[in-house]
């Protein structure tokens, strides 16, 4: 009898797993939060776009929860920091590849794409790119030559291994409702060279790897004051036959971010005939930067994300003919660049234990056939 009971019990357990795994909808709890019924992100979106994560080299260890989660959910990775100029060429002429190589190797072993991030930026770029030893700005010729050497070295090393590159990052002025100031004029690139450094960077990049897709990447891209500048810039580059293939919308958004602005922007950019990618998605639980911080994922935060996340993905799916990929700027809520002491942003679809959050299931339901 005892044996029978044990067998009966294990049979029940087996039945439970068979049924809960066989259908994504089996047995959802009230939050739609059934741990057994999720579909990995890369599977969920496989007919629409690739799904990426920004990572550190440590995340590539598949014996760790992060490594396993990457392999389970994502089919693309971006180096969160280790491919930036200050990581690869901190000292002029001395290239440090170890960390970036680890990420590229991991992607290769696991059949993932890599987004290269980033080649030309005012931030996380060593001073020697811009200044001489007296602290004076370099000449235009020297700065361009150094930029060309950097882009050529990095893109040559990863030729054929990196699908798309953020060639120029955040070159446009951010807050200017009247549209008077176009470029980020305090960028040393702009100060030394003027707007044509953007054109040059794309030309160098195309020469270094003619097969790589070349992107202009920026934040706040969905707001009217910025999206028109991005549109004008990309149109000008295309009209001048500068090789540019895509626009990266970073996607550092708040739960209150307007999906109508997102839709308008996708509509506008699609008209340029370039590929679009969401490159750095994180959706902060706060309504704005002024809201007081919390280190607890409250019911209110949960509700907000359950509304905002599916709204955003609804729009992304509507434009999936133009969107090639969606990359999150991290993996799960345990770590985000947005977090500060006393203020966590919980910006992802995976929670601090790297498990699907209720918002994940709401997004998943959009794909239900
Ligand atoms: C951030 C990283 O996440 C941080 O770890 C680092 O300290 C600063 O940069 N836009 C970009 C990314 O293009 O490179 C930035 O990444 C986030 C904003």
Image (cartoon, rainbow, N blue to C red):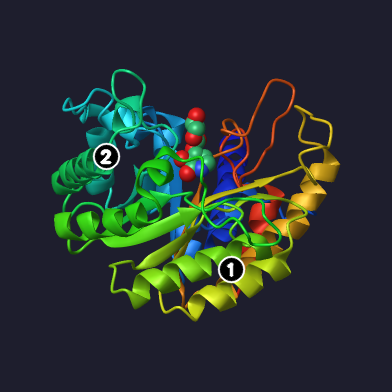
In the rendering, at what x and y percent does residue 244 appear? Answer: 33, 66
Residue at the (59%, 55%) spot, across then down? 181
Q: Secondary structure at mark 2?
A: helix
Q: Which mark is residue 143?
A: 2
Q: Is residue 319 visible?
A: no
Q: Which mark is residue 228?
A: 1
Ligand 1 neighbours mark 2 (CB distance < 8 Å):
no
218 and 338: which is toward the camera: 218
Q: CA distance from mark 2 to mark 1?
A: 29 Å
User: Is residue 313 positioned above or below 149 on the image?
Assistant: below
In the rendering, at what x and y percent does residue 212 appear? Answer: 24, 60
The answer to whether mark 2 and mark 1 are in CB contact below 8 A is no
Q: Nearer the viewer, mark 2 or mark 1?
A: 2
212 and 128: which is toward the camera: 128
User: Is residue 227 positioned above or below 152 on the image?
Assistant: below
Q: Secondary structure at mark 1?
A: helix
Q: In the rendered structure, which disc, 2 or 1, sits on the residue that comes first in sequence?
A: 2
Location of residue 68 by image quarter = top left
In the rendering, at what x and y percent does residue 261 appear? Answer: 69, 67
Location of residue 105 by image quarter = top left
In this picture, residue 145 sits left or right of residue 25: left
Location of residue 324 by image quarter = bottom left
Residue at the (75%, 27%) spot, across then down? 295
In this picture, residue 368 sits left or right of residue 131: right
Q: Could you classify mark 2 by the number of other residues whose Cα lies within 10 Å: few (under 14), some (14-19), or many (20 or more)?
A: many
Residue at the (35%, 47%) spot, across then down? 193
Q: Could you classify mark 1 by the number of other residues whose Cα lies within 10 Å: few (under 14), some (14-19), or many (20 or more)?
A: some
Q: Quadrant of the C terminus?
A: bottom right
Q: How many marks?
A: 2
26 and 319: which is toward the camera: 319
């Amino acid at each position: 009898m005892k044996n029978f009971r044990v067998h009966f019990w294990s049979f029940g357990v087996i039945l439970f797993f068979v049924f809960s795994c066989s259908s994504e909808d089996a047995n959802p709890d009230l939050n739609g939060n059934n741990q057994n019924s999720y579909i990995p992100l890369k599977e969920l979106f496989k007919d629409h776009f690739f799904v990426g994560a920004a990572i550190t080299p440590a995340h590539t260890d598949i014996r760790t929860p992060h490594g396993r989660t990457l392999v389970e959910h994502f089919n693309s990775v971006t180096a969160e920091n280790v491919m930036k100029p200050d990581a690869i060429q901190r000292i002029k002429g001395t290239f440090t590849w170890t960390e970036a190589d680890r990420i590229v190797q991991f992607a290769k072993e696991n059949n993932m794409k890599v987004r290269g991030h980033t080649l030309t930026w005012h931030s996380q770029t060593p001073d020697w790119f811009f200044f001489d030893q007296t602290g004076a700005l370099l000449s235009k010729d020297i700065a361009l030559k150094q930029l060309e050497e950097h882009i050529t070295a990095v893109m040559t090393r990863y030729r054929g291994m990196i699908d798309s590159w953020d060639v120029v990052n955040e070159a446009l002025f951010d807050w200017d409702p009247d549209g008077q100031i176009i470029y980020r004029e305090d960028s040393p690139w702009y100060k030394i060279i003027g707007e044509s450094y953007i054109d040059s960077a794309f030309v160098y990049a195309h020469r270094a790897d003619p097969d790589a897709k070349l992107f202009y990447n920026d934040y706040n891209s969905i707001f009217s004051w910025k999206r028109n500048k991005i549109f004008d810039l990309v149109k000008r580059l295309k009209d001048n036959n500068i090789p540019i293939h895509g626009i990266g919308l970073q996607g550092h958004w708040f739960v209150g971010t307007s999906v109508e602005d997102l839709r308008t922007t996708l509509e506008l950019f699609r008209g340029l005939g370039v590929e679009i990618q969401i490159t750095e998605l994180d959706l902060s639980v706060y309504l704005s930067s002024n809201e007081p911080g919390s280190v607890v994922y409250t019911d209110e935060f949960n509700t907000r994300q359950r509304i905002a996340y599916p709204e955003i993905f609804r729009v992304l799916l509507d434009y999936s003919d133009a969107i090639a990929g969606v990359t999150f700027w991290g993996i799960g809520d345990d770590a985000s660049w947005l977090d500060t002491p006393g203020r966590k942003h919980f910006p992802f679809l995976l929670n601090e234990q790297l498990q699907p959050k209720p918002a994940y299931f709401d997004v998943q339901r959009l794909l239900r056939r």
